[in-house]
Amino acid sequence: MIIAIRISGLVEIPKKIKEFLYRIRLRKKYTAILLEETKENQALLQQLRNFIAYGQLNKDTLIQLIEKRAQVIGKKKMDPKKVADEIEKKALKDLGIKPFFRLHPPRGGIDSKLHFPIRKGVLGDNKEKINDLVRRML
């Protein structure tokens, strides 16, 4: 499972990129979505790498994310571990959860949003380090 978090704000974003972000439900700063690992999603993330942070989400962080930040549709009760197990088979909406997560700004701050010319920020592919960022944002 890949998590994508919007880091950059609304100012000075090209129209095409803004449209991509709106279509995948990353409309506000510090919102996150879960994506499957497909060629199409990888290509999309590659185009959005200057505006989002993404990487592989592990099972423990996924359970914490669902437990603390998932918004239930209706008045159903949910078990975070059960949802984490079924998330690869069903969509979040089918499980009774909104398809995006609203997060806090990261505790301790963002070192730098810049990643060009030397990679020194959180933008782009963070691989396994994204789990630390998500935990700081819960």
Image (cartoon, grey):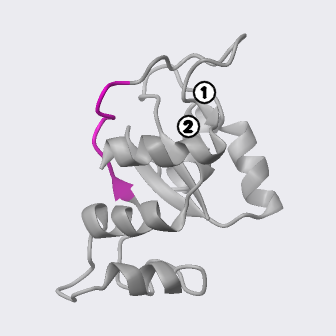
Residue wearing tag 2: 52
Closer to us: 16 or 130: 130
Horizontally, residue 109 falls left or right of residue 123, namely left
Magenta residues (range): 101-109
**What's the mark number on residue 14?**
1
Which residue corresponds to the image point at 41% horizontal and 87% vertical from the top-left?
Answer: 82
Mark 1 element type: loop
The Cα atoms of the two marked residues, 1 and 2, are separated by: 14 Å
Q: Residues within 10 Å of mark 2 (few under 14, many from 20)?
A: many
Q: Residue at x 31, y 67 (%)?
A: 70
Asked if residue 108 is positioned above or below residue 100 in the image, the reply reads above
Left or right: residue 77 compared with residue 60:
left
The local crowd at label 1, few if under 14, some if 14 to 19, many if 20 or more residues have their Cα within 10 Å, is: few
Observer-nearest residue: 10 or 113?
A: 113
In which image quadrant can residue 60 be found?
Answer: bottom left
Residue 88: percent from left, percent from top: 60, 80
Q: Is residue 54 visible?
A: no
User: Mark 1 or 2 closer to N-term?
Assistant: 1
**Amino acid found under the numbered disc labelled 2:** Ile
Where in the figure is residue 137, as x and y percent of width and height?
33, 43
Is 33 located above or below residue 124 in the figure?
below
Q: Secondary structure at mark 2?
A: strand
